[in-house]
Image: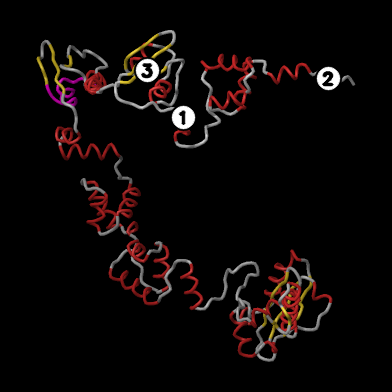
Amino acid sequence: MRIHGLCAESAKDLTQWRKTKTTLKRYRESKHLPPYEKHHDSPGVYLISMPEVSGLVYVGSAAQTIRHRWRQHISDLLAQRHGNSMLQRAVNKYGTDKLRFEILEICASDEVLQREQEWLARYDWDDLFNLNPNAASRLGAKLSEEDRLKLAESHGGISSPVILQEIAEYYRRGATQQALAERYKVDRSSIRNYLVRLKVEMRQLASENTELVAQVKELYEKGANAKQCAKKAGIDHDTALRILRASGVLRDASERQKMRVRKLGRRHYAEAAGAHIHEFQHPEHGSFRGYQFEFREKFGLPVSCVSQLCTGCRSELAGWRLVGAPKKTANRDKQVLKVHTFTHPTHGEFTGSQRDFLRAFGGMTQAGVSGLVNGRWDAYKRWEIKSRADPHVFRKGSRRERAGLPRNSRRKIPLCDHQAIKAELEAGVTQAAIAARYGVHQGSISNLCKRQGWETKRSKVKARVTPIAA
């Protein structure tokens, strides 16, 4: 393969070709620049002008070297990718030969932006090619209508004049800003900015309309909810809530519940909520059947005491007794508890549910017994599962092992196995072998030995080593 007269068969020739190409590119760019001088390799502020064509000038700064920045300008202008559209159009029309480069000031790298801003202040804004009045940001940049529309599109806005006119027309017909924002998938502030830019007459905000606020407040105080108020007033739900909050009439949860009870009636509300009907017996007043609130209101009894009587926490209240089992007791009796058989080398066997097992033997936790029943633990305080009432396949190993995952290094060693571990260590079994059998990290076995003060094989070896005298 031949490239510009060079043979690129070898890496050496290819490297030489690249160097030649770079040299040609720099020569093409440098021929438009002034002759090289030593101070061109310093940072500072420079000026680009076209005195033969226009009186406009471009003020810029270079934090590295001024000549390097000039070369970047020439390269971007020749490639039609310069960031300054005004300068690019001027070069496209008159050519790069009309450009003149001057150095305004040589300064330190950390001062170039400050000095550039001072030089920009010396020129009238209409006499500059610069698009930004600020040297360090794009704040206040000159943007054409086309550039402004492209910028809006890139940030998720709307740039089409047809769609903007459509938004303005919908708003004049009565559409709300929130509805337009949801339709065109922009935020509400963007819709307001579009309407202001199109000089559309803005309607008064609902929260500032005294007649509308009074209407919403009146409807709400008569018993309507916020959604009904918004629908009747022709506003959205959020605006209605803001009006009610600002007016201080928005009801809380308890007030809303009381209003629902008043509308439906207390008994119908209790039936809809699925309340429980109780039957009470008194030696003088006879019997009464009904809801708690009916019983309480008829005989003037306190709320908490009636609730305790209905749940079985108290057996009698002012001579009244509950006929039948309390609600909680009745629900508990309906539960079918599973029966298990537990075995212990000392206590023998025990058959019953987890609840009975916890009551019969103290010092146990619900989590430990559940882990034994569910198969998470092989043994809990030396208790084991012998059989169950329902068919169940005993799950061996931990949940991580059954899922095919490595054993958890943080698994704790049961207290009942400490003596067995001590006996194995005294018999010469290594800590690694014990850790593998119990599914823990070897460091757990080592920490256990330190806490218990056991002598291991390694500690005995250390004890036999005598320090060397100095």
Dot 2: what SS? loop
Q: Which of 335 and 170 lies nearest the eye of the viewer?
A: 335
Tell me: 168 left or right of 290: right
Q: Which of 272 and 227 lies nearest the eye of the viewer?
A: 272
Q: Which residue carries the number 2 mark?
A: 467
Q: Which of 184 and 36 lies nearest the eye of the viewer?
A: 36
Does label 1 or label 3 sit earlier along the sequence?
A: 3
What amino acid does circle 2 point to? Answer: Pro
Q: Which residue carries the number 3 mark?
A: 386
What amino acid does circle 3 point to? Answer: Lys
Q: Eyeballing the image, is 44 above or below 247?
A: below
Does label 2 or label 1 sit earlier along the sequence?
A: 1
Can you give x and y, in whole percent of width and height, for residue 172 in the image?
Answer: 31, 71
Q: Which residue carries the number 1 mark?
A: 398
Does label 2 or label 3 sit earlier along the sequence?
A: 3
Q: Which residues are the magenta region?
A: 289-302
Looking at the figure, which quarter contains the C terminus? top right
